Amino acid sequence: MRLHPEETEAGPWSPVDDGALAALLGSLLPAGRGVLLVDGRSGSGKTTFAERAAALLGGAVVHTDDLAWHHDAVAWDDLALEHVIGPWRRGEVVDHRPPGWVAKGRDGSVTVPEGVRVLVLEGVGAGRASLAPHADAVVWVQADRDEARERGLRRDVELGRTREEAERFWDEWMTAEEPFLADDRPWDSADLVVRGDAGGWVAAARDGPRS
């Protein structure tokens, strides 16, 4: 697996089906309830994993891209704490219009349905040092950097960009993502590391407490 120079490959890897994955995640959450952060580089498959985890755990997913939209690529953690994690922990309704939504007139809001047992916050930087202490578990989705890039480009083309536009957007985004991740090292906060493997998932649990 080709990773960025500051990141080491996790392992040993063990295949996990839905039952094993649900049990593994459940063991990380108190009484099957709590805040799960799912982090990973762009194109790693973290959104797919987060949605699967939420389905297995009776949870709901909040995407950090929605908090960051027309606001800041990486400096949205205060919004996550004040308007998503904090209210959910207190049993309050989560219904937040991020600054970018207000400024650009985007309809709707970031919400979490009532009664969900697990709040899943996913996105690049979700497992950062400023958020990890407020979560019950952190998952890092590890991926080969070349495969992740190609996956991300295909996604952007499917969303309507030309290949050239997708490559330009990817390279611009990486100028924010790569230095942030290299400095924060959210994989060091992970209780569990996963990666996609032949259409399924493989997992590597942390040996000892996370940093």
Image (tube, rainbow, N blue to C red):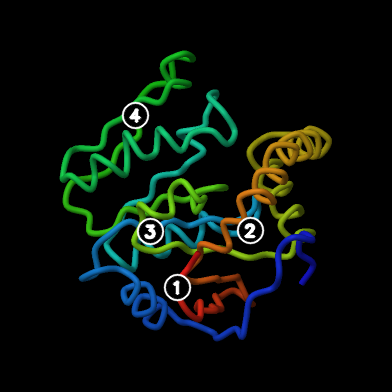
Q: Quadrant of residue 171?
A: top right
Q: Is residue 3 above or below residue 112?
A: below
> Which residue is the site of mark 3?
36
Which sits earlier in the primary sequence, circle 4 or circle 3?
3
Vertical relation: 18 (above or below) 190: below
Q: CA distance from mark 3 to mark 2?
A: 17 Å
Secondary structure under the numbered disc 1 in the rendered image: loop
Secondary structure category for the residue under label 2? loop
Residue with the mark numbered 1? 209
Quadrant of the image containing the N terminus: bottom right
Pointer 1 or 2: first along the chain: 2
Q: Nearer the viewer, mark 3 or mark 1?
A: 1
Name the residue carrying label 2: 44
In the figure, 49 relative to 204: above or below? above
In primary-sequence order, the first of circles 3 and 2 is 3
CA–CA distance between discs 4 and 3?
A: 21 Å
- 163 vs 69, left or right, is right
Mark identifier at residue 196 = none
Of tags 4 and 3, which is closer to the observer? 3
Label 3 vs label 1: CA separation?
Answer: 16 Å
Q: Which kind of residue does numbered mark 2 sit on?
A: Ser
Question: CA separation, marks 1 and 2?
Answer: 24 Å
Dot 1, how many residues are within 10 Å of its Cα: few (below 14), some (14-19), or many (20+)?
few
Q: Specify the amino acid type for callout 3.
A: Leu
Left or right, residue 69 beside residue 44: left
Label ID, residue 109: 4
Q: Foreground: 61 or 92? A: 92
